[in-house]
Image (spheres, rainbow, N blue to C red):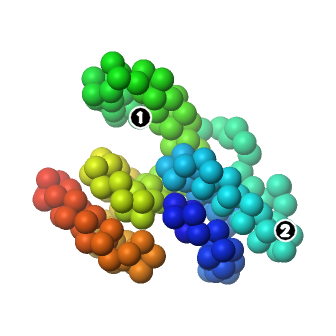
Amino acid sequence: MITRGQTDALVFYTRFALDHGVTPREVSEIATHLAFYAGWCNGTAAAIAIGTVFAERGIGRDQLPPASPDLLPLDQAAEDTRARTVEQSFGAISPGLVEDTGAVLFRDLWLRPDLAPRDRSMVTVAALIASGQFAQISYHLGRAMDNGLTRIEASEMVSHLAYYAGWPNAFSAVAVVKGVFESRGD
């Protein structure tokens, strides 16, 4: 809902998520994460919609993650490989984007502790599928599987997303997912 800017539906699904065990901290982290992956305007619109649900349920700031939490440990070897690849591919074109990708996304956002790395990866892959960003799925699905997402869960996620992001996005994504499965031998 956040990725597609569907804030009216987001109110319903935020209530649904909270009623089914998703914590306010996790909802907040999902919205924060998707502000980067779905765009800042979608993220801020989502924060307003989610805020109405939090207000009606008496969910206060004390139940949300801090703005600057103690971050999870960084896998320095994986980060060095990722940073080198991004720098080689895009550094000469957009050095600011390359720098922000490292500093903001992978050395901050991805290390926030209030959303498990597996869940953060699932949210990212779902956002990529919902927005039709198929070129990014291979990297992020591989990372999701490194973070514990199983083949069955990835398959179910694509199937589930067909209802929310449309069959064309799901079918376009499933070809990429197949390639990731085959390349990993999972």
Task: Locate the N terminus by quadrant.
Answer: bottom right
Between 80 and 165, which is closer to the camera in this rendering?
165
**Residue 87 screen position, x and y as percent:** 33, 23
Count of numbered tags? 2
Q: Residue at x 27, y 23 (%)?
A: 88
Relative to 166, 35 lies left or right: right
Residue 94 found in image quarter: top left
The amino acid sitting under disc 1 is: Asp
40 shown above or below 85: below
Task: Locate the C terminus by quadrant.
Answer: bottom left
Which numbered disc covers residue 10?
A: none
The amino acid sitting under disc 2 is: Ala
Q: For mark 1, does the 10 Å Cα neighbourhood hold few (<14), some (14 to 19), or many (20 or more) residues? A: few
158 shown above or below 126: below
18 shown above or below 104: below
**Residue 146 screen position, x and y as percent:** 32, 51
Between 81 and 37, which is closer to the camera in this rendering?
37
Residue receiving disc 2: 55
| Callout 1: SS | loop
**Residue 74 screen position, x and y as percent:** 47, 34
| Callout 2: SS | helix
Q: Which residue is drawn at 24% across and 62% down?
A: 177
Q: Residue at x 84, y 74 (%)?
A: 56
Which numbered disc covers residue 75?
A: 1
Residue 182 found in image quarter: bottom left
Give the CA distance from mark 2 to mark 1: 37 Å
